[in-house]
Image (tube, grey):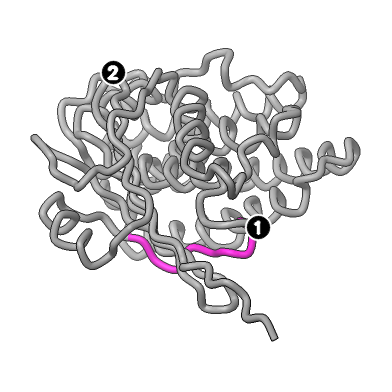
Amino acid sequence: MAKGIEWNERYNIGVEEIDRAHQRLFKIVNKLIVFNEDEKKSRWACMEGIKYFKSYAIKHFEQEEAYMKFTNYSGYERHKRIHADLRDKTLPALERELAESEYSTEAIQHFLGICIGWLSGHILAEDHAIISKEVQKWQYDTSEELPILEKAIIKVLHDVFELDAETISEHYTGTAVGKWLCYRMLYQNKKGEKVQIILVFEAQLVTHTVGKLLNLQFKKIDRMAVDAIKLLSQQILKRIGVYLKPAERYTLEKDNIMTGEQLQQGLPKLKPQYRMLFDTGEGHFAVFIKKPIERPKKTV
């Protein structure tokens, strides 16, 4: 039986009011996980619990935005847009799915996976930046882009998953041994320029990271684990600014899960500029990035 998301000190940002609200959101998700395992209570309890999660999250967003405004936080507008995206798009879509499926087990697991991934990733990747003086540290330095990007990824893997990763290849071809979870994201800006990013998790890394968040020993990758990894991946990318600067001008257009075979077949056509493989100690993690080619300006 799942015990829920395990709270620990690394989630604290040092602002008592905000930390208390985050702990409360964790408790709500934990109760939903327990309710989902009790067939007699599942539907009614989840219906009420999900409404409460939404209302409390919205109230917390207002509280957090007021604090950011009071402290003149430079990332206020961007952070506010992230809140609005969950409030106005993600949660309503999940509510529709739940209602249409009559609160099926699969739909509830999907909702919980999204909540776990978003909440954990958002706190560690975005909320910590509110009180951190290093928020701009990982912006690209075009003269040495690859080393900066590698350091950013290693730092985020440590901050979010408490993993000490090391780069073992800067020219990874996508060859996999065993089972992999491949998550592809396509971002686009108003000019139509696209950035494709594929994050690849070894199966044991997925079960370790999500299992640690849930305080549960996972034996296989299920729907909840996949959805949690997807949302965590999106939060990681927002933190390292992977999809070109300024990152906020790019929006996620589509995403999908790929098999290892699809990854290997698609890489030659994609021709990513960055192909990095990391060893985390708990499994391998790979990153593929395809950016628009920056052409030199014509001189008259």
Report whether 273 appears left or right of 281: right
Q: Is residue 252 one of those drawn in magenta?
A: yes
Q: Which residue is mark 2?
A: 281
Quarter-of-image position of residue 67: top right
For label 2, count other residues whose C-alpha is less than 10 Å away and answer few (under 14), some (14-19) or many (20+): few
Q: Nearer the viewer, residue 116 or 142?
A: 142
Q: Which mark is residue 246?
A: 1
Image quadrant where one finds the C terminus: bottom right
Q: Tag 1's secondary structure?
A: loop
Residue 161 location, x and y as percent?
Answer: 43, 25
Work out whether 274 lies above or below 119.
below
- First-in-chain label (2 vs 1): 1
Q: Nearer the viewer, residue 211 or 180?
A: 180
Task: Name the residue at 39% across, 60% down.
Answer: 290
The amino acid type of the residue labelled 2 equals Gly
Task: Name the residue at 54% across, 64% down.
Answer: 251
Which residues lie in the magenta part?
Answer: 247-255
For label 1, count other residues whose C-alpha is less than 10 Å away and answer few (under 14), some (14-19) or many (20+): few
Residue 164 location, x and y as percent?
Answer: 40, 18
Quarter-of-image position of residue 176: top left
Q: Is residue 230 one of those drawn in magenta?
A: no
Report the Cα–Cα distance between label 2 and label 1: 33 Å
Residue 20 visible somewhere in the drawing: yes
Residue 223 location, x and y as percent?
Answer: 25, 44
